[in-house]
Amino acid sequence: MTPEDIRNILEAVKQGSQDVDTALESLKELPFTEMGFAKIDNHRQLRTGYPEVIFCAGKTIEQALQIIRLMYGQHHNILGTRASEELYQCVKKEFPEAEYNVAARAIVIRREEILLTDSYISIVTAGTADIPVAEEAAVTAELFGNRVERIFDVGVAGIHRLYSRLDLIRGGRVIIAVAGMEGALPGVLGGLVDKPVIAVPTSVGYGANFSGLSALLTMLNSCAAGISVVNIDNGFGAGYIASLINKIK
Amino acid sequence: MTPEDIRNILEAVKQGSQDVDTALESLKELPFTEMGFAKIDNHRQLRTGYPEVIFCAGKTIEQALQIIRLMYGQHHNILGTRASEELYQCVKKEFPEAEYNVAARAIVIRREEILLTDSYISIVTAGTADIPVAEEAAVTAELFGNRVERIFDVGVAGIHRLYSRLDLIRGGRVIIAVAGMEGALPGVLGGLVDKPVIAVPTSVGYGANFSGLSALLTMLNSCAAGISVVNIDNGFGAGYIASLINKIK
Amino acid sequence: MTPEDIRNILEAVKQGSQDVDTALESLKELPFTEMGFAKIDNHRQLRTGYPEVIFCAGKTIEQALQIIRLMYGQHHNILGTRASEELYQCVKKEFPEAEYNVAARAIVIRREEILLTDSYISIVTAGTADIPVAEEAAVTAELFGNRVERIFDVGVAGIHRLYSRLDLIRGGRVIIAVAGMEGALPGVLGGLVDKPVIAVPTSVGYGANFSGLSALLTMLNSCAAGISVVNIDNGFGAGYIASLINKIK
Amino acid sequence: MTPEDIRNILEAVKQGSQDVDTALESLKELPFTEMGFAKIDNHRQLRTGYPEVIFCAGKTIEQALQIIRLMYGQHHNILGTRASEELYQCVKKEFPEAEYNVAARAIVIRREEILLTDSYISIVTAGTADIPVAEEAAVTAELFGNRVERIFDVGVAGIHRLYSRLDLIRGGRVIIAVAGMEGALPGVLGGLVDKPVIAVPTSVGYGANFSGLSALLTMLNSCAAGISVVNIDNGFGAGYIASLINKIK
Amino acid sequence: MTPEDIRNILEAVKQGSQDVDTALESLKELPFTEMGFAKIDNHRQLRTGYPEVIFCAGKTIEQALQIIRLMYGQHHNILGTRASEELYQCVKKEFPEAEYNVAARAIVIRREEILLTDSYISIVTAGTADIPVAEEAAVTAELFGNRVERIFDVGVAGIHRLYSRLDLIRGGRVIIAVAGMEGALPGVLGGLVDKPVIAVPTSVGYGANFSGLSALLTMLNSCAAGISVVNIDNGFGAGYIASLINKIK
Amino acid sequence: MTPEDIRNILEAVKQGSQDVDTALESLKELPFTEMGFAKIDNHRQLRTGYPEVIFCAGKTIEQALQIIRLMYGQHHNILGTRASEELYQCVKKEFPEAEYNVAARAIVIRREEILLTDSYISIVTAGTADIPVAEEAAVTAELFGNRVERIFDVGVAGIHRLYSRLDLIRGGRVIIAVAGMEGALPGVLGGLVDKPVIAVPTSVGYGANFSGLSALLTMLNSCAAGISVVNIDNGFGAGYIASLINKIK
Amino acid sequence: MTPEDIRNILEAVKQGSQDVDTALESLKELPFTEMGFAKIDNHRQLRTGYPEVIFCAGKTIEQALQIIRLMYGQHHNILGTRASEELYQCVKKEFPEAEYNVAARAIVIRREEILLTDSYISIVTAGTADIPVAEEAAVTAELFGNRVERIFDVGVAGIHRLYSRLDLIRGGRVIIAVAGMEGALPGVLGGLVDKPVIAVPTSVGYGANFSGLSALLTMLNSCAAGISVVNIDNGFGAGYIASLINKIK
Amino acid sequence: MTPEDIRNILEAVKQGSQDVDTALESLKELPFTEMGFAKIDNHRQLRTGYPEVIFCAGKTIEQALQIIRLMYGQHHNILGTRASEELYQCVKKEFPEAEYNVAARAIVIRREEILLTDSYISIVTAGTADIPVAEEAAVTAELFGNRVERIFDVGVAGIHRLYSRLDLIRGGRVIIAVAGMEGALPGVLGGLVDKPVIAVPTSVGYGANFSGLSALLTMLNSCAAGISVVNIDNGFGAGYIASLINKIK
C-alpha cells in the first residue's frame, strides 16, 4: 500500500464517499484466505504476475489438497514443488489436467495461457544426477512464462563438452548452473560469459561432500565475479530469480 | 573465440591473406600480459565493458603497484579492493588522482569518463556496521557505470524504518541487501518487492554468529523467493552481479 | 529442602518428637520411586504444580507403560511427549481416557481438573510445517493450566499476514514463535512487541538448513532484544517456560 | 499503531479536525531520526519504557558520539554496550556524568530517575571469568529499573557452593545463569528452582570449547525444563529479557 | 618382545640350542591367524588376560561366524559387540551356550570360569535411554572379571536422585558415567567424588544434540578434574579402560 | 588438441587438402556422444588408455543401461561403480559376460584383453570393514592393467600384524592405504616406506567418527610425509591415481 | 557429608551436646571462603589430599593474587595453571619461593613436603611442540605426589623411536600420551601396552588440524581399547586423572 | 630391518663373529640422536636419499638451532620449513651459507651437491596469493633433486590463461596444483592431463572460505579422477610426494 493509496482512502473518507469502517478494513486489509493451518495470499498474482507456489514437503496430503482447491477456484496456474508421487495421484483424481514432472517432483496445473519470452534462460548441469534439480528450475521458469534451454552434463571434468555448447549457453539472458560434488561449473562459466549466473549446489556426491556443503562453499568462494548462489537443491528458487531477471524490461 | 571467429581465420588462411604462423598465434591467442607472479587479462574491458579489478589482499605492495602501472598504461579505469591505507599511500604518490574510499577500503583511479545508467541499484543495510561492505558494493557498481541509491540501517528489529524507505528501495532495478547478525533483512525484503535481491551476509556480530555463518545460512534458507547470495563480506561480488542485471537491455 | 525444613526436623529430634532414624531418612529423603530403569519423582507436582512429564523417545513401550501406571496411581495428569502412534494404542487399551494429539505426537491423560489462566500465551508459527512443534508447545501449556492462542502461518515472506494478527499476538503475556527454514519470525516479532518471546527453531527445511541449525543460529543472533531460544523442535520446553512466565503473580 | 489509533485518525479526518496531509504523515509516520549512517528510534522509550541502547562494536567513535548526542538531547537514559575504554574517554570529555563499568565494557549516562522493582533478578555465574558477561546483564537490568542480586562462582564442579546460595537464587522472579566451559550450571539450576532461567553461554574456556559453542549446546540440550538460551556472551540480551519478565504485572 | 626375550633367543642360538630358522621365526613372529579378510590375534589373552573382542558392525554374518569358530576352538571367552539379533540367531544355532544382552546388543560365550574382583566399577546413567550404552560397558567389564554396580537414571535435572545413591557410586574404584542430551552428569560427579570418572557421551537427544556431539563437548570441557572421555556410545571402550584401572594392583 | 595439431589443420586448409567446413568441425570438435541426459566421451580411451567409467549412483537404471550399450558398441572395457545389485541383474540379462564384485559394488565387462604390469600396487586395509572400499580400488586398478597385492586387516591397534606383511607392502611401486575409525594406518606406513601412499578414509566407525570425517582429518594432518588423500570411501579415485603412478615409465 | 556424618550430628542434637543453630550451620555448611568474585574451597585438601588449583586464564592479576594470598595463609601447596609471565612476576615479588615452569606456564608454591609414589606415570609426546602440554601434566602430577617419567618426541612418523623407549613407557602404572597434528600416538600405544592411556590432543598443527580438532577426533575414534581422552591442550586434567589412577591402593 | 638383516645377525652370532651384546644393540638399534626435547633420525638420508627436514613452527629458536647444528655436523643438506625471519637471522650468523626463501619461509643449507632429474614437476597456482605455498613445494622438490617448472596465476576464472600454458604443465611427470578460494583448478586440470595431480588447498580467501576448508572440500570432491590432496597450505608435503613420484624408476 503506497502513500498514494493511503491518500486516496483519506480523501474518500474526508469527502464522505467512504465510511470509516470500510476505510478501516482497507487500511488493515487482509489480502489472504485464512485456512487455519495456512494463510493463502490471494492478491499475489495480481501484484507480481506470479502464481502462488505450494511447497508440499511438510504438509499433509489433505492440507496440500485444500490449498490446491482454493487456488483452482481462483483460476490461477498452480505449481506444487517437492510433491510425492502419492500426492500427485490424489491431485490427479480431482483435477485430471494436473501434470507431474517426475524428475523435478513437481505438480503443474495450467489454468491460464502462458506466453513465453523471446529471450531465454540457459539451464546447465554438471552431471546427469543434477538433472532433477535443473528440472525443478525449468518447470518453475516455464510456468512463469520464460523460454528455457537445457544443456545437461557439461561438468568441468571434461571441459570440451562445455565449450561445444558455449554459444548456446551464452545466448541466454541469465544462466542457471547446477552442480554437485565439487561444484566448480558456475565458477568456470563465470569466467567465460558476461551474464548473471545463478549457481545451484546439489546434494549429489558422497563422503566429504557433506550433502552439498562442498559444492555450496565452492560456489560462494568462486573467484569469478557475476555468480550468486541459492540453497542446496533449490531449483525452484533459481528458476524464480532467473525469471525475475529474464523479464526485466 | 566464437565459431565465426575461427571461420574467419580459416578463410583468411585459405585465401592466403593470413600466413599459418599468424593464424596459429591467433588460435592459441594470449590475451594477457605475463608478469611472472600474475597474468593480467588485457582484453577484458573490450569484451565485457568492465575494467579489470585487483583483489589486493594477499598481494605484496610491489605486486599491486606493478599491476596498477600496467593497467594505467592501458588507460583503463582501475579498482583495487581490500586495499590497505598503506597501499593507498604508495599508489597516491605515483598516481595523484587515485581516490580512497575508507569504509570500503577501495582504491579507484578514473581514467575514462563514466556514464551512469538511468535505472538504479538499491543498496540496503540492516545496520551501521554493515556499511563498509555496502560501500564496497556501491564503489564497484558506480565505477561500472550504475546509478546507486544507498539506504542504510533499516534492519528488521525496527521494521517501520524499512517501511518508510520501501518506495525508494522498490524503485531499483535490482536490490543489494547487506546484513550481519541474524541476516533476516533480505528475506523480509524478498516478500515485499518483485525485484531480484542480491543478499550479502556480513561478518558483523559475535558469539554464535561464527564470523558471518549465521547470516549466510539465514539468507540461503530464506522462504521468500527471488533471493540469491554471495560470499560473506563480498561487497564487490554483489556490486558486479547487480551491475550485470541493471545493464540488461 | 529449605533451611526452615531442616530446622523443623532438628527441633523435632531435640524435643524427642522424631527419632533419629526417621529424621535421618527425612534428611536423606528419597522423593522418588525406584523402578530400576528409571527413578520417578513423586513430589514434583506438590512442589511445582506441574505434572511429571514422560519423554517417550528412547524408552521401550513396556518402560513407558510402567511409568504411566505408576503416575496414574498417583492421580496426576500425565503428559507423554514424542510418543509413537503404536505406544498410544497400548496406552489406550489400558487407560481408555488417554487422548492423542497426532500433530504433536503427545499422549495426554487428564486425572485432575485444570483451571486455565485469564492471561494467555500466543503461539505463532512461520509456516504450516511448523505446526507439529507448535502443537507440542500448546498441549504442554494447556495441560499446565494456561490459556493458549494459536496463530499459524504468518512467516516473514508475506509479512502482511503477520500484521493482520499482530493485536492478537501482542495480547499474550508471553509469545512462543516457532519457525524453520531461515527462522526470521522471532526477530521480526521481537521488534514489534514488548513481551518476552520464546523462539523455537524447527528442523523444517532442506539443504543448508542442516536440520534446523540455520534457524537456531538466526534466532540466537537476532538483533531484536527480548528473545531467548530453546532446542530445535523443542515445543515442550517452550510450552513449559512460557507457562512459568505466564503464571508469574 | 493499533486499529484503534487508525480509527481515531480516520474519525478526525472525517470530522475535519485533522487535514489529510497531517493524517498522511501520521499513517506513514517516521518515528526515527535519519542520521545517514543510522536511523535512531525516538519513540522507543515512550512505547516500551526502555531507553534506546547503542551496540558500540562496529561503529566508529564519531558515529557513536553522534548517536549519544542525539539521545542526550532527548533526555533519555543512555546505555552503550561493547564500548572500548577509548570511546568512554571521548564520551566522558563531552558528558562528564558518563560512567563506565570496566568488566561489562558498558557506558551508562543516567538522565532520568530510575525506580527499582521490589522483586529481583538473580544473576548467577559458574566461574570468576564469567563475571564480565554477568555484569553486562546486571548493568542492563539495573538501568531498566530492576533490582538485581549477584551470586558469582557457584559452578557445578563444587556444587555445595551453589547449595549454600540456593535460597537467594530462588528468591528471584527470574534467574540469569551465566557459564562457560561445559556450561552445566543452568541445567542443574533448572532442576532445583521453579522460575524461568535465562541461560547465557560464555566464550570462557579453551580447546574443544570452540569459543562458547560447547556451553551453548549444553544449555540448548538441557533435560531440565524451564531454560531458554541467548547468544554466546550476550549479557545485554539476557538482562533485557529478564527485565521483561520481572516487570510483568 | 622385550630386550630380555631377544637376549634369550640370541643366547640359545649362540649355544646351538636353537637353530637359525627357528630363531628367525621367533623374531619375525606372527602371533595371529591369517583369515584373508581378518588377522586374529591369538596370543592376546596370554599377554593381557583379556579375551579378543569382535566388533561385529561392518562384518558380514559369515565373517563374524568364522572368527567366532576360530576363537571358540581356542577355548577363550568371546565377546561380540554391536551384534544384530540376526547374527545372534546364527551364532546360537552353532553355539547354544551363547547369550545375548538385548539392550547392549552383545553376544557372550563363556568358555572359562570368570573370577570377579572384590572392588567394583560403578556404572551410572543420566537417563533411561542411556541404559543400552551402560549395559555394553557392564557386559564388557563383567566378562573381563570385574564386579559392577549399576545406578541408572540419576541425571542432574533431578539431582536429589543422584545424592541418594552417592555412597554406592563413590564406593567404586572407578566410575563410568553415561549421559546423552546435555551430558552434565560426569562433571557434577567429578566434583563430588575423588575417583577417576570415565565419561561416555551417548547419541540420545534431538535437535542441537547433533547425534551426541553436545554431550561429548560438555564432557571434554568439564571444569571438574578427574574426568576423561571415550567416543560417543562407546560402552565397550569405557568398560575396557575401567577394567584396566579396577585391576591395578 | 596441441599446437602441432592446429598447425597441421591450418596447413591442410592452406594447401586446399581440407575444406573450411571440415576444418571448422575439427577445431570445434565434439569428441563425445550426446545422449540428452549425458554426454559420453568417446575418445577418452584413445587419449589416455583408460576406459570410460560410469558412476552409477544418482543415475536411473535406464540411464545406466543406455550408457553401457553405447560403450559396449565401441568395444571398450566397461566399469560401473556404486552399482546396485538390482542394476547388475538388468545389465547381466543384456550382457551375460558382465561380472559383479559384491564387496566393491562394481560391474565389470571385459571386452579387450588386459595386460598386467610387472610392478604392483599394494592395497592395504586397517580392518575387515574397510575391505569394500579396498576392493573398489583393486577392481579399478586391475581393469586398468595393474597387478595388485591385497593386504587386509593390518591396522595400528595390533601393529605386529602390519610388520609381518611389511616386505610385501613395501614391494609395491605405490601403496593404497584404506582405513576408517581413527585412520592412523597411512601415517604409520608413511614413516616405514619410501613409496607414495594414497590414503583413503572410510566411513567405517561410529560416534565422533562423523561418517569418515575423523579418518579424513587424521590423514590430512599426518606428520609423516609422502601421503596424499582422496575423498571418503573413494576407492575408485585411489585405484585410478595409483594406476597413473604405477604406469609411469 | 555422608549419612554417618548426618547421624552423628542428629545424635548430638538429641543428646543436647549440640544446639540447633550450630547443627543447622553444619548441615548447611559453607566449606569455602566467599571473595565476591570467587568462592574458595577450603576443605578440599583435607577431603582429597589435593591442593586447590587456580586456573589463571580469565582472571585479573589482582583476582589471582587475592586467591593465592588466601591459600598461602592456609599453608597449602599452590598450583596456578595458564599463568602469564607477567602474573608470575607479581606473585614472585610477594612470595619469593614461587617457581615458574616456562614451558607449562605454571606457577608452583611448595608449602608442604611432597612424598613421591614408587610407581610412576609415563608422560609421552609425539613431537617437540607438544612438550608444553606435557609439562603442564608433569608439573601437576609431581605437585600431587607422583613420580613422573618424561619420554618426548616419539611420534608414529618414525616409529622406531617409540620402540626404543617402549620398556620405559610400559613401566608406568598409567600413561599420558600427548600429540597434535594427526594425533595417532595414543592409538598405537594402546595396542602395545596394557595400562590405561590418557590421551591429550594438542592444538599443534595447521590447516585441516582446526586447532586440535583433528587430533581430538583421532583419539576418540581409536580402535585400540584402553584409551580415554581429555580436552585439547588440557595437560592439567591429564595429570590430575593420572594421579587419581596412580594412587589407587 | 628386513628378515635378511636379522638372519645375517643371527648367523654371525652362531658363528661367534658377533657377540651377544653387540647383536642385541643391533636388534634394538637406535638410529637417532637423543636431544631430550627431540630425537633426530640419523639414518634417514642413507635409507631414503632424503635429508631430514625441520618443521620450525612450535620449536624455540634454541631448539631449532641445536637440531641444525647436529645435522650440519653430519654434512646433510638441511631444510627448515615454516621458519621465521628471526630464526633465519640466528641461523645465518652461525652458518653464513644458509639461504632464505622469503615467500616460502624456508631456510636451506646446501652441504652436498644436488643432481637434478631430467623429468620435471609442474607447480601451478590459481592466483598470486597462492605463490608462497607453491614456493614451499618448489624449494622442497628442488632440494630433493627434482627439476621444477613454475606456472603461476592460471586459475579457472580466466581459463584461457591456463590453456596457453597447458603444454608446459602437461610436460611434467607429476603436477602440483595450488589453489585457494574455491579451489577448482586441480579438478579442471585433472580433466585435461593424464598425469597424477597433487592438489594443495590454501587458506587464501575470506568469508565462507573458512581458512581453506572450502578449497579442501572442492578438491576432495573433484569428479575428475587422478587427483589426491594434501593438508591446507602444505607445500612441503606436496613437494615431497611429487618427488617420490618423479623419481620412480
Image (cartoon, coloured by chain):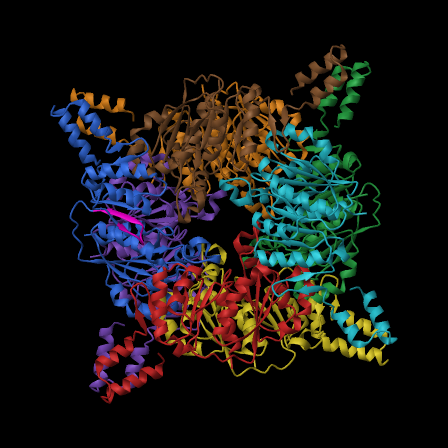
Chain colours: A orange, B brown, C purple, D blue, E yellow, F green, G red, H cyan
Residue D209 in picture, x, y percent from top left? 45, 57
Q: Is residue F208 left or right of residue B162?
A: right
Q: Quadrant of the C terminus of chain F?
A: top right
Query: In the image shown, does G210 or E59 lie closer to the viewer?
Result: G210
Q: Is residue H224 left or right of residue D98?
A: right
Vertical order, D105 against G152 (above or below) = above
Quadrant location of residue F124?
Answer: bottom right
**Is residue B240 visible in the rendered structure shown here?**
no
- Which segment did they paint magenta? D100-109
Does the magenta run of residues contain B53? Answer: no
Vertical order, H57 against D157 (above or below) = above
Quadrant location of residue B35?
Answer: top right
In this view, the residue farthest toward the bottom is G15
In this view, the residue farthest toward the right is H15
Quadrant location of residue H36?
Answer: bottom right
Residue A102 in picture, x, y percent from top left? 56, 36
Residue B7 in picture, x, y percent from top left? 70, 15
**Is residue G60 visible in the rendered structure shown here?**
yes
Q: Would you say the magenta stretch is mainly helix, strand or loop?
A: strand
How many labels, in total?
Answer: 0
Q: Quadrant of the N terminus of chain F?
A: top right
Residue H144 in picture, x, y percent from top left? 73, 48
Q: Is residue G238 left or right of residue C245?
A: right
Does the magenta run of residues contain D103? Answer: yes
